[in-house]
Image (cartoon, helix red, strand yellow):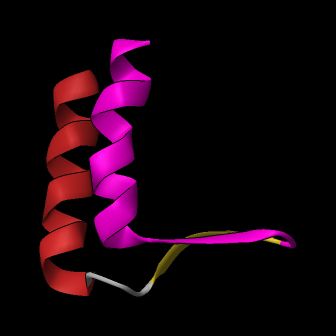
């Protein structure tokens, strides 16, 4: 499961770069930043 999520995050980052991946009232994270954050979150 972790490998699939990491692969998906990298693929989306390559295609979508700065487009919004996550948005809440106080913060917007693009796909590129999200791909950088996912491995750290997966590692705990």
Q: How many marks?
A: 0
Picture quadrant where residue 38 is located: top left
- Looking at the rendered image, the quarter that the C terminus falls into is top left
The vertical placement of 4 against 10, above or below, is above
* Residue 5 lies within the magenta run: no
The vertical placement of 11 against 7, above or below, is below
- Looking at the rendered image, the quarter that the N terminus falls into is top left
Coordinates of residue 23 in the picture (x, y in percent)? 68, 71
Picture quadrant where residue 13 is located: bottom left
Relative horizontal placement of residue 1, taking residue 22 as reference (left or right): left
Q: Residue furthest right?
A: 25
Coordinates of residue 39 in the picture (x, y in percent)? 28, 32
Residue placed at 87% from the left, 73% from the top?
A: 25
Relative horizontal placement of residue 23, taking residue 1 as reference (left or right): right
Coordinates of residue 15 in the picture (x, y in percent)? 16, 82
* Residue 28 lies within the magenta run: yes
Q: Which residues are magenta?
A: 25-44
Residue placed at 72% from the left, 69% from the top?
A: 27
Main SS of the magenta segment?
helix
Relative horizontal placement of residue 31, taking residue 13 as reference (left or right): right
């Amino acid at each position: 499961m972790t490998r699939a999520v990491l692969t998906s995050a990298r693929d989306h980052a390559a295609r979508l770069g700065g487009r919004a991946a996550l948005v809440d009232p106080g913060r917007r994270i693009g796909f590129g930043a999200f791909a950088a954050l996912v491995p750290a979150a997966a590692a705990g």
